[in-house]
């Protein structure tokens, strides 16, 4: 992967929320890249900051939250420097989002085709209505919504179809990146599988990049090219999906993968039980945020936070097991005495 | 890579949770200030104000300088203005004297006929006699004169020992009489003054206001309590049981609710007759539909919650469900209504007594004062301004407390 | 319990025969005036199964399958429309309201959403003790100790600390433990678990599942385990019933069903479940269409419009549940072809 293949660079992104108990850093100095035409899975449990991350990429964080630090470089430009007008153009046209509950993200008094037409006209005002409708029709058909359903209202469609409308809204303006935030969580298994197939198809056909944010580890194994694992506001591991699943490096990843059930008989007949709970982010643990639950914690883990470093080609880990630090040496020599 | 075998250990209580308990109530109160901003200040200010008002209502005698029914001053005295200090005029050669020196029955004291000074003289004599030791009696002979000149002339000749007059009336008249002097004020010490003025009968407005607080609070809080006690259970049962009972009650309550408040209260008060108890009832009826509606609505909602179903699946009896599951979850919204209710009840009570219903006419009550002060709007503005201000202020304080409390209490706080 | 109300004590704790539950469709005023007949949602349309004491039966299905409704009718939370439901030989429909209420002690529920199923105004200890207060009021002095003991057993330690807490002060995983403690404190025979771990965090689910299995052994419980996740079912269910649109498509020993699914719907459902292994990605296509409207289920076999193997008679005759292999029942005319 070289420079030209990078669609978006996220550098030292931090998102802070002001709460009753103090400031919470939901996302803490995260850096990674999104490549063109890839499906990147962002997995983590609730409260790890993955949804916040998704919203931050479109600068859609609402008060009491705000982006406290970082650069978001999309196709060479830092969108953090964009003004409101530029952001409006950016959202929808360059990056679009699919949400968990399509019922509340679609306008209940607008027909499905009108949704698409409205999106087109908002960003390309000169388009005539007939042209926009034609584009909408072709696109929706591609997504599996037949012509006779195009004039339906959102409540007349099933959950899966509504999600496809959302995907359509994302595609109609030829967005380069679609962010799917728990897009399949509320769907039945078969519908989820079909939507996953669809996402793969549109990536193959249109070359869009997909950021799939989910807590469903198995889904990510089915769908993603690369996987980023988040914990307590940090990305703790990033790599190709095969590498992560075959050879997880971070203890959290290891524990997480072994606690995921599989329907396959004679595979993983027992689930690994991780102790503890995700931390409260107003008082995160010192040093590495995972250390209270980590079976491999070392003294340095309690005092210093590890960096997010490349441990192997195209593999990043944020863990002292794979990094050196002067104190690490001295501590272990002390212990061995 | 296989994970290490994690022996299942009991979960350690995270430190931050223990800390949260130790953070005391007072500190949490102050942390809340930052979070709720304006609402916190509203609650704090109105809360303090109301505590003060309630204190005044319970112990009016600490705050009121006078008995509200006593006619302690001249009528229609402007606020802040001290009542005229009537003076005693006497002959120079008598030296420094006070009224006591010439109040014996062998003395004569003169005044202009019908002047307020004569009234003051009588009052002072009564006071002196009340406080006099055994056997001593002050009863000078009183001489009336038609004009100032006559009385001064009489004093000059020695016909009278002293002359009581309003100093403004006296002005420079003494210049002509080198033999006469102002011996001193009629009273030894000044009177307490009337900070808000007096009404047409001479009662101190301020004292009446203070004592009126008590009535207002009694009526306001009692009627709110009665409404609460009647309306809440009705709403609970109606919402919980449903069916025809619910429909009938709702119809009844809606019709009551649709009456304009004051008119309904008047009709009921007219039927019931005078008396503070009847006033409380009339106002209470007004508010029952409000409690009913709110409680019924909340009950209908809470009834569908999963924890109520969970209670049912445990085998809980319907009565226990109402008591432990529905009631506690419905009450928060009602508490807010209560405080607004009290404010509104006070207002209604003032209106009722303004129109002459319920309370005996001399009761120190804001509404009554407002009614009596109407005719003096231009001459004595303070007669209605102060009672009116009190009604508004107390109503406002209660409403402010209620509204801002509802902002704070209702979105239930989550710890994340 | 009078003898006339009991069947002969059977080896099965739960017996359900041809259960049907239909909900009338809410109609607006105009439809009510003009419509000739009422329409029903056929949530459960003829379901039969048996559960032995100590077994775990999984009810698996997608939305509209009726799995939740079956659970609620079995436990007696909803009245059935027709059919028979027996608990420990007792026909639930013969019980008075009060008798059913008392029977609750033996049938408890673990709900899906722990936060919603706990009274926000009741402390955790109070909530947990409710079962004892209702069914064993005479032992009131011991209630607190029993509750503390139960809390320790489900992993809420130190129990004295959690006893006075409120639901919003603890995490989701802990809340579910409270719900489990509340359900188990009366030592029930049957526990209806309605998607009990669906709302917990991924890393906590394994702990909760393990807890439920342990408690089953210790208290000799029988579970009716409702889930939409076939992967989870593998770790706790002995038998599994796959439901589609209010009827059982396939039911049998879980290992048998998973190793050889004989109903096309089961096959599709199992293929659809994502596997956490990137080298084992799904290649089979998914069935066309979507779950039909339960008010007007398709004729004959309900799955026929979407079934890749449908034959002409599938749309005409509804297949019966037949025992194709030992303890493995399938409702499909051509199930043998898949053996």
Image (cartoon, rainbow, N blue to C red):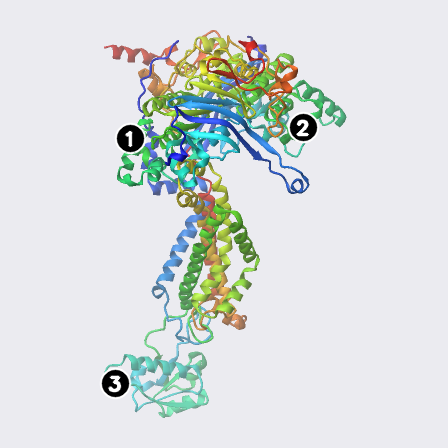
Quadrant location of the C terminus of chain B in the rendered image: top left
Disc 2 to disc 1, how far (Cα)?
56 Å
Q: Chain of mark 2?
A: A
Residue in front for this viewpoint, A317 or A41: A41
Q: Where residue A23 sits: x, y (%)? A: 43, 31
Q: Quadrant of the N terminus of chain B?
A: top left
Name the one closer to the observer, C258 or C277.
C258
How far across and how far down the image is residue B304, in percent? 49, 39
Residue at x-position 45% and y-position 47% = B405
Taking A259 as reference, is B314 above or below it?
below
Q: Do marks 2 and 1 share a subunit? A: no
The picture places residue B206, in percent across and down from the top left corner, at: 42, 67
Q: As drawn, is B173 to the left or to the right of A224? A: left
- Alpha-carbon distance for marks 2 and 3? 105 Å
Q: Which residue is mark 1?
A: C149
Q: Residue B136 — which label?
A: 3
């Amino acid at each position: 992967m070289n420079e030209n293949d990078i669609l978006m660079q996220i550098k030292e992104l931090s998102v802070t929320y002001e709460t009753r108990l103090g400031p919470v850093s939901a996302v803490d100095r995260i850096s990674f890249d999104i490549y063109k035409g890839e499906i990147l899975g962002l997995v983590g449990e609730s409260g790890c900051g993955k949804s916040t991350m998704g919203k931050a990429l479109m600068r859609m964080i609402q008060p009491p939250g705000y982006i406290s630090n970082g650069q978001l470089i999309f196709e060479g430009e830092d969108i953090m420097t964009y003004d409101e007008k530029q952001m409006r153009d950016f959202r929808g046209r360059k990056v679009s989002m699919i949400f968990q509950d399509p019922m509340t993200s679609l306008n209940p008094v607008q027909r499905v085709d009108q949704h698409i037409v409205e999106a087109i006209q908002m960003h390309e005002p000169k388009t005539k209505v007939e042209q926009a409708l034609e584009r909408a029709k072709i696109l929706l058909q591609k997504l599996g919504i037949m012509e006779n359903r195009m004039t339906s209202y959102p409540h007349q469609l099933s959950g899966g179809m509504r999600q496809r409308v959302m995907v359509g809204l994302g595609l109609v303006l030829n967005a380069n990146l679609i962010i799917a935030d728990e897009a399949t969580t509320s769907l039945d298994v078969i519908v989820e599988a079909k939507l996953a197939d669809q996402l793969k198809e549109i990536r193959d056909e249109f070359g869009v990049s997909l950021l799939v944010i989910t807590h469903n580890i198995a889904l990510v194994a089915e769908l993603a090219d690369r996987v980023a694992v988040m914990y307590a506001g940090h990305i703790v591991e990033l790599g190709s999906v095969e590498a992560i699943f075959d050879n997880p490096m971070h203890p959290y990843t290891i524990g997480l993968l072994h606690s995921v059930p599989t329907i396959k008989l004679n595979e993983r007949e027992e689930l690994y039980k991780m102790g503890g709970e995700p931390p409260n982010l107003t008082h995160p643990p010192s040093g590495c945020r995972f250390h209270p639950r980590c079976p491999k914690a070392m003294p340095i883990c309690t005092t210093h936070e590890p960096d997010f470093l490349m441990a192997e080609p195209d593999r990043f880990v944020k863990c002292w097991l794979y990094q050196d630090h002067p104190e690490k040496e001295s501590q272990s020599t002390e212990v061995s005495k | 890579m296989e994970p290490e075998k994690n022996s299942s250990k009991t979960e350690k209580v995270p430190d931050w949770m223990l800390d949260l308990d130790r953070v005391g109530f007072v500190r949490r109160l102050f942390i809340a200030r930052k979070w709720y901003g304006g609402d916190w200040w509203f609650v704090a200010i109105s809360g303090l104000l109301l505590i003060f008002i309630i204190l005044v209502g319970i112990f009016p005698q600490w705050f009121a300088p006078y008995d509200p029914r006593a006619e302690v001053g001249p009528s229609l005295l402007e606020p802040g203005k001290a009542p005229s200090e009537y003076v005693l005029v006497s002959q120079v050669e008598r030296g420094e004297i006070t009224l006591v020196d010439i109040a014996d029955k062998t003395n004569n004291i003169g005044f202009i006929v019908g002047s307020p000074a004569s009234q003051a003289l009588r009052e002072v004599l009564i006071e002196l006699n009340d406080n006099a030791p055994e056997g001593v009696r002050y009863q000078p002979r009183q001489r009336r004169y038609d004009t100032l000149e006559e009385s001064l002339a009489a004093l000059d000749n020695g016909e009278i020992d002293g002359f009581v007059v309003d100093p403004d009336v006296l002005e420079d008249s003494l210049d002509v009489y080198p033999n006469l002097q102002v011996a001193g004020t009629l009273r030894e010490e000044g009177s307490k003054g009337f900070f808000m003025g007096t009404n047409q009968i001479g009662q101190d407005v301020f004292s009446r206001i203070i004592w009126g607080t008590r009535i207002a609070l009694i009526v306001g809080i009692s009627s709110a309590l009665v409404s609460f006690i009647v309306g809440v259970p009705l709403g609970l049962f109606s919402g919980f049981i449903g069916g025809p009972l619910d429909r009938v009650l709702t119809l009844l309550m809606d019709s009551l609710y649709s009456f304009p408040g004051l008119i309904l209260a008047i009709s009921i008060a007219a039927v019931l007759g005078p008396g503070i108890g009847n006033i409380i009832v009339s106002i209470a009826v007004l508010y029952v539909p409000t409690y009913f509606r709110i409680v019924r609505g909340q009950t209908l909602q809470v009834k569908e919650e999963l924890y109520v179903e969970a209670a049912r699946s445990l085998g809980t009896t319907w009565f226990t469900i109402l008591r432990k599951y529905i009631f506690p979850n419905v009450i928060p919204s009602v508490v807010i209504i209560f405080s607004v209710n009290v404010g509104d009840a006070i207002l209604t009570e003032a209106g009722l007594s303004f129109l002459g219903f319920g309370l005996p006419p001399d009761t120190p009550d804001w509404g009554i004062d407002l009614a009596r002060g109407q005719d003096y709007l231009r001459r004595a503005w303070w007669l209605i301004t102060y009672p009116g201000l009190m009604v508004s202020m107390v109503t406002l304080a209660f409403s402010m407390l209620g509204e801002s409390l509802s902002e704070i209490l209702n979105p239930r706080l989550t710890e994340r | 319990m009078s003898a006339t109300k009991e069947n002969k004590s059977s080896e099965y704790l739960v017996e359900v025969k041809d259960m049907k539950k239909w909900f009338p469709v809410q109609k607006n005023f105009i439809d009510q005036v003009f419509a000739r007949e009422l329409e029903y949602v056929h949530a459960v349309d003829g379901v039969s199964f048996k559960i032995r004491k100590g077994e775990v039966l999984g009810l698996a299905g997608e939305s509209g399958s009726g799995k939740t409704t079956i659970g609620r009718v079995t436990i007696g939370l909803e009245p059935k429309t027709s059919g028979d439901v027996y608990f420990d030989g007792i026909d639930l429909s013969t019980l008075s309201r009060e008798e059913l209420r008392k029977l609750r002690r033996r049938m408890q529920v673990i709900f899906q959403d722990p936060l919603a199923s706990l009274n926000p105004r009741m402390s955790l200890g109070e909530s947990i003790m409710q079962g004892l207060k209702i069914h064993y009021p005479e032992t009131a002095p011991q209630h607190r100790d029993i509750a503390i003991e139960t809390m320790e057993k489900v992993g809420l330690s130190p129990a004295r600390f959690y006893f006075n807490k409120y639901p919003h002060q603890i995490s989701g995983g802990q809340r579910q433990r409270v719900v489990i403690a509340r359900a188990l404190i009366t030592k029930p025979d049957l526990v209806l678990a309605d998607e009990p771990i669906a709302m917990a965090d991924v890393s906590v689910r394994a702990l909760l599942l393990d807890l439920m299995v342990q408690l089953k052994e210790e208290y000799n419980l029988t579970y009716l385990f409702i889930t939409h996740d076939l992967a989870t079912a593998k770790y706790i269910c002995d038998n599994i019933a796959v439901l589609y649109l209010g009827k059982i498509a396939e039911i049998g020993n879980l290992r048998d069903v998973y190793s050889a699914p004989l109903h096309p719907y089961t096959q599709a459902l199992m293929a659809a479940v994502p596997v956490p292994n990137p080298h084992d990605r799904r290649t089979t296509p998914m069935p066309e269409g979507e779950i039909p409207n339960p008010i007007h289920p398709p004729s004959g076999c309900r799955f026929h419009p979407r079934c890749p193997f449908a034959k002409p008679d599938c749309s005409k005759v509804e297949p019966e549940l037949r025992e194709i292999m030992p303890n493995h029942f399938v409702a499909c005319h051509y199930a043998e072809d898949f053996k």
